[in-house]
Image (cartoon, grey):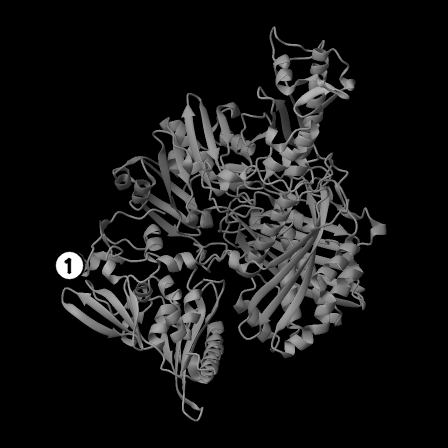
Amino acid sequence: MTWVGQRVARKEDLPLVTGTGTYVPDFNLPGTLEVAFVRSPFAHARITSIDTAEALAAEGVVAIFTGPDIRDKVHALVLDQEAAPPGLETAEPEIHPATIEILADGEVRHVGQAVVAVVADSRYHAEDAVDLVRIEYKELPAALDPEQARLPGAPIVFDNVPNNVQARYRIRVGDAAAALDAAEHRLAMTIRSQRIMAAPMETRGVLASTVGEETTVWSSTQIPWAVRNSIAGAIGVPQRQIRVQIAHMGGGFGQKVNVYPEEVLITYISRVLKCPVRWVEDRVENMIASGHARDQLHHVEAAFDAEGHITAVRDRFVLDSGVACPYPLSSAYNVASHFRSMYRIPNFAIDAECVLTHKMFNLPYRGAGRPEAAFVMDRVINAVAQELSLDPADVIRRNLIPDEEQPYRMRMPYRDGHEVVYDASGFPAAFDRLLELIGYEEHRRTQAQLRAQGVHRGIGLGTYVEGTGVGPFESGQLQVDSQGHVVIYSGCAPHGQGLDTTMSQVVADAFGITPADVVFRAGDTALLPYGVGTFASRSVVTAGAAIIESSNRLLTRIKAIAGEMLEMAPEDLEVGGGRVSVHGVPSRGVSFKEVYRAASPGPGARLPEGMDAGAAESFYWVPPTVTWGFGVVGAVVDVDPETGVVDVKKLVMLHDCGRVINPLIVEGQIEGGLVQGIGATLYEHVVYDESGQPRATTFLDYLLPTSAEVPEIVQEHLEGTPSDRNPLGVKGVGESGPISPPAAIANAIIDALSPLKIQLNELPLSPATVAAAIERAGG
Amino acid sequence: MKPAQFEYHAPTDVGEAVRLLSALGENARLLAGGQSLMPMLNLRLARPEAIVDINRIAALAYHRLEDETLVIGALCRQRDIERDQEVLARCAAIADAVPLIGHIGIRNRGTVVGSLAHADPAAEWPVLAVLLDATLEVESAAGRRSIAAKDFFKGLFATDLRAGELVVEARFPLPPEGAGSAFIEVARRHGDFALGAAAAVVELAADGSVAAARLALGGFDSVPVRATPDPAVVATEVHPVDDVHAPAAYRSKLAETLARRALELAEQRARKADR
């Protein structure tokens, strides 16, 4: 029996779906104090006074901390985690570290910024006291439009970032300018991906408990090691004094891939007060003070011939960073490296700037630059078809990279400094299969007739590529325990992805046991000395590689130990069923439990000459570069041309994620991702008004897709190209789903109303947006 | 997101509730289904000194048909109406509207009268109330009075209710036999407050011509509006505003579209004797 490839039910789900999980708010440490924050009501203001006297005297209040109180004791986070690596010089990156203040000191820079922390015996009392803190502000002009904010004279967000341009890069492949000048046809478009947010079901939360010098911090984070390191640096203690663990988590999607002020401050307060201190973010805080995403405005031009072959694309875009863009390479550079998707476009130029404004900071969100790039590229392809009165499917097909040109070199570096070279093929076949599955020809035959009956139905198409499994490294450790189980220690910790089950399948095959005999532990800086985390479609690629390599080492070790016990050569032994036994003689063997005892240090050890005690092995995997998945997505929509209402009837997706370990989990990832894609396309929008006030601060106004908005979903895994860039042959899949729906759905709406030749270049496609586009087109 | 402190009262009969409201005056808020008040408390947008929870007043948990009138007590849940096939068969506009209100969980708790008293102009029940010329029966220490729906809604979340008053019952005269009715809305997602809603009743004369028509609109003004049943003029009778979901200009056009569709559907139903 081989477990890899099976639809194994998720081992980890019972507590998650029965309300018996342990999340940060569920810990019950005696004497835990709760924190509530006073947050800035202004986008940009000077703090002229803070009076905490009345709040401090209120019932249940224990302590209050202000920016001046912690000055010189807790340092702002200065994040340069994405300094450009060697190999990226041709992109001429200029990156200023992102500054994230712990508590505002003298000046507030966005609505929602933490100004005062109130510590009380309950969250109720803490919130009561928040109302009693008196702060006077003098409002200052705010930088809110990134195109304006980068010009001289604009309000400056941080003095060390001139012109508010925190990061910039440029890519030149071929000569786009010359190709545009020489082009038979060209077009120019302005395309916006709006500001949205991950909105995980579980908001953030931090609990810190200090015993002696050591503080244990439970945080809802995707990156425990980086959180540990940042906390230690900000409060000036050795990293060994801080242990960061995750509890059960209700999603992250990139919003929890950054270290946050609250993680630092709650740790600090716990160390000052010598007791457990917790802050659990409420939903309004999550919407105004947890990372937002996307928010890119593109000015794109394309050159093409009469058949729709695209000869050049030139793009300039600004990313509205808010007060920081902590991951400029992920959020912005990913746009460049994924921009040309599955297309053979010889000349390409892109100029990007991450511009600071007085809004919440901008983080990578599931897809991380790829949905924005795919929306621009596949809107361009669609506009080329519209311009030439060609079928969009024909124009896509004509531009696909043919198999004979794979592995295709994109002649530009990935964000890890290595050249982008696709390790995939079969683009045309996948595209043809999509058209077949979605009934494209039938649609073309019946569309006009349906329209005459009042049904405005359209099909739209999108494509993507995805570099997955980015480094710098990931850690894994495997151990046989006293029960004879195999225990995985992983540097990647799941927050819903099913990594426990997936990795258990891999290890079960390696050891000839069942996934139930495998124990998965992760997300604790005390378990492994080094680790990174779960984000960027990387866990199965990177942690999987570390785990399979550890697994190989551990097999060698336990065979050697069993050989000593059985007086046999290790190569004459086989592992299976929780035992190590002689080839062909199953009765002659030892159990994993016995191996564990033989591996224990001391007089009972039975170890080969020269081998140290222990039944564990570890490995740090450093990927050579990323491995490339790809996919194609089609959307079927009905549009009401009078009201602009869009009804998504169906989404079809085919994708290559290399070798599939658990189809059930992969399908779940795709389905959830597609639905988030629907949200980003039709519903979600973090709106700031002209004074920098956020206008969508509850789920009444920030609209997530619900089950009622989920259409029929059809998906197929392509049995295409197992990766040769990692030992499992896998490619990441976590972020694939949300990349293409914006382009596919927009193109479908345009197709539904094709006689009008409308343009939809700004998300979200609300009924009002669609109706306005129809009106502009004279419909 | 924790409410500020408040006194909590849970009367078990209307008399006790009215005495409490009279004593507490402006400082009290009534709690029925809690679908609007609870979030407002948690967000500290509402900070009443006292809550008078009427959920234990069993005598208010009813609805019934009295001849051609649907009578709804203050504790009747929206879901109770949704599950009453006889009521739904007597008024297609109600049958259309109720499934559009939030989601089943919301309708299980939310009350019809609570929705009226909350007076959100984009909510369904206020639109039905002005369409069907409902009346609201109100009790206070001073006694009982009736308020016509057209006089009840005074502005955004504002009503004719005075401090100390409790709406005990709403009375909806149903469309007469032979009439047709309809309720149509456009919302961003299923269950959201409508970007706009239109409801209509059309009555036919013996010769098949339209004898009478009524039109009500929601979400286009600070109150639900009883409009002239003519799509060509409705946009001039409402005052939509911009919000994060749609600009006013979109809503003006939507008012016309929905008015036309609601009137057409109501008329079609009248011709099929589907009220």
Residue at point 72% right, 9% down?
A: A609
Say above or below: A638 vs B45. Answer: below
Residue at point 77% right, 38% down?
A: A724
Nearer-the-camera pick, A264 or B271 = B271
Nearer-the-camera pick, A244 or A487 = A487
The residue tagged 1 is B19
Q: Position of residue A669 (x, y in %)?
A: 61, 47
Say above or below: B222 vs A172. Answer: below
Q: Position of residue A718 (x, y in %)?
A: 74, 49
Q: Is residue A745 left or right of residue A324?
A: right
Secondary element at tag 1: helix
How busy is the neighbourhood of tag 1: few (under 14 within 10 Å), some, or many (20 plus)?
some
Q: Looking at this view, name the residue that lies furthest to the bottom.
A: B207
Q: Is residue A382 left or right of residue B189?
A: right
Q: Is residue A526 left or right of residue A65?
A: right
Badge count: 1
Residue at point 54% right, 55% down?
A: A195
Placement of the C terminus of chain A among the 4 image quadrants: bottom right
Residue at point 80% right, 48% down?
A: A408
Q: Is residue A373 visible?
A: yes
Say above or below: A211 vs A19. Answer: above
Q: Is residue A759 visible?
A: no
Placement of the N terminus of chain A among the 4 image quadrants: top right
Nearer-the-camera pick, A347 or B22 = B22
Q: Looking at this view, name the residue that lies furthest to the top.
A: A603
Q: Position of residue A381 (x, y in %)?
A: 72, 62
Q: On what subunit does the disc labeled 1 rest?
A: B
Nearer-the-camera pick, B225 or A73 = B225
Q: Position of residue B275 (x, y in %)?
A: 41, 78
* Dot 1 amino acid type: Arg
